[in-house]
Image (cartoon, rainbow, N blue to C red):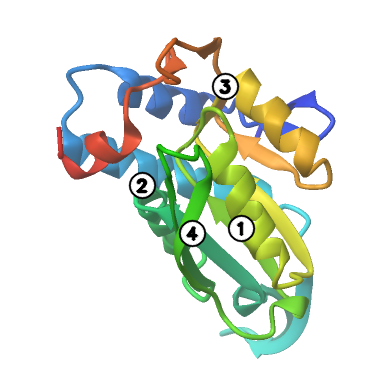
């Protein structure tokens, strides 16, 4: 699958199939059900690139012809941690490609009085030290929620940590790189920037509302 690196740790997956599906997501007239399906499909495709260098375990199997040594991905060593609520759709797509992966969730909201990111829920598997954590959300706009989520997951000491999104704003990418320069970001596009309300442009609107049909 084709990819290009914009930043030292930002990988844009520009495979034609990924870009085709992303274009359909961007269209204003795309329904919630189609938007949700496309988000899942793109995420499954991104999982191929993210796991490109994940170690394989040699395993003896029997084919219909003869025994052989083949290789399996240890999905149990992968943990997909979705940022609630919209990250659920991204996690579903990755899990469809790697069904044995473990699943975690983190819930965050912005306190309008203090402008601080507040965590209201966190659940991840035990023994993260030998697992690769894939933190997922459809968008990185300002980067504040993603930064807080990454910091929380880092506190569990995972073996490796990767952030996956569909689209990102340059401002959010720079913010994440400032606080977590060691964490690679995989996405389908880095857009032009943020508008005065903090939305990604051209973007695809509010991902949560479009996924769940709440607007």
Say which of 32 and 86 sits in front: 86
C-alpha gap between disc 2 and disc 3: 17 Å
Residue 143 can be seen in this image: yes
- Name which of mark 2 and mark 3 comes first in the sequence: 2
Tag 3 secondary structure: loop
Front position among marks 3 and 4: 4
C-alpha gap between disc 2 and disc 4: 16 Å
Tag 2 secondary structure: loop
C-alpha gap between disc 1 and disc 4: 18 Å
Which residue is disc 1 drawn over?
134
C-alpha gap between disc 1 and disc 3: 20 Å
Q: Residue at x 77, y 27 (%)?
A: 5
Front position among marks 1 and 3: 3
- Name which of mark 1 and mark 4 comes first in the sequence: 4
Tell me the number on the disc at residue 169.
3
Q: Residue at x 83, y 47 (%)?
A: 182
Say which of 60 and 44 sits in front: 44
Measuring from the top left, give residue 70's x and y in whole percent: 72, 77
Up/down of 80 relative to 15, above or below: below
Tag 4 secondary structure: strand
Tell me the number on the disc at residue 119.
4
- Name which of mark 2 and mark 4 comes first in the sequence: 2
- Name which of mark 3 and mark 4 comes first in the sequence: 4
Tag 1 secondary structure: strand
Which residue is disc 2 drawn over?
86
CB-based contact (under 8 Å), mark 2 and mark 3: no
């Amino acid at each position: 699958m084709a990819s290009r690196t914009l930043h030292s740790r930002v990988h844009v997956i520009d495979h034609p199939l990924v870009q085709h599906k992303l274009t359909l997501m961007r269209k204003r007239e795309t329904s919630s059900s189609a938007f949700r399906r496309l988000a899942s499909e793109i995420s499954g495709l991104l999982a191929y690139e993210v796991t490109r260098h994940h170690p394989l375990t040699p395993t003896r199997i029997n084919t219909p012809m003869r025994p052989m040594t083949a290789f399996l991905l240890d999905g149990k060593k992968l943990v997909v941690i979705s940022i609630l609520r919209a990250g659920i759709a991204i996690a579903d797509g990755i899990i469809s490609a790697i069904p044995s992966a473990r699943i975690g969730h983190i819930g965050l909201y912005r306190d309008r009085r203090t402008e601080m990111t507040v965590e209201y829920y966190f659940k991840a598997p035990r023994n993260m030290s030998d697992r690769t954590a894939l933190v997922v959300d459809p968008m990185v706009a300002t980067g504040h929620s993603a930064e807080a989520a990454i910091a929380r997951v880092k506190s569990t000491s995972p073996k490796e940590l990767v952030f996956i999104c569909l689209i990102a704003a340059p401002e959010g990418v720079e913010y994440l790189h400032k606080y977590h320069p060691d964490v690679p970001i995989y996405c389908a596009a880095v857009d032009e920037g943020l508008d005065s309300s903090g939305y990604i442009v051209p973007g695809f609107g509010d991902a949560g509302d479009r996924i769940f049909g709440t607007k």
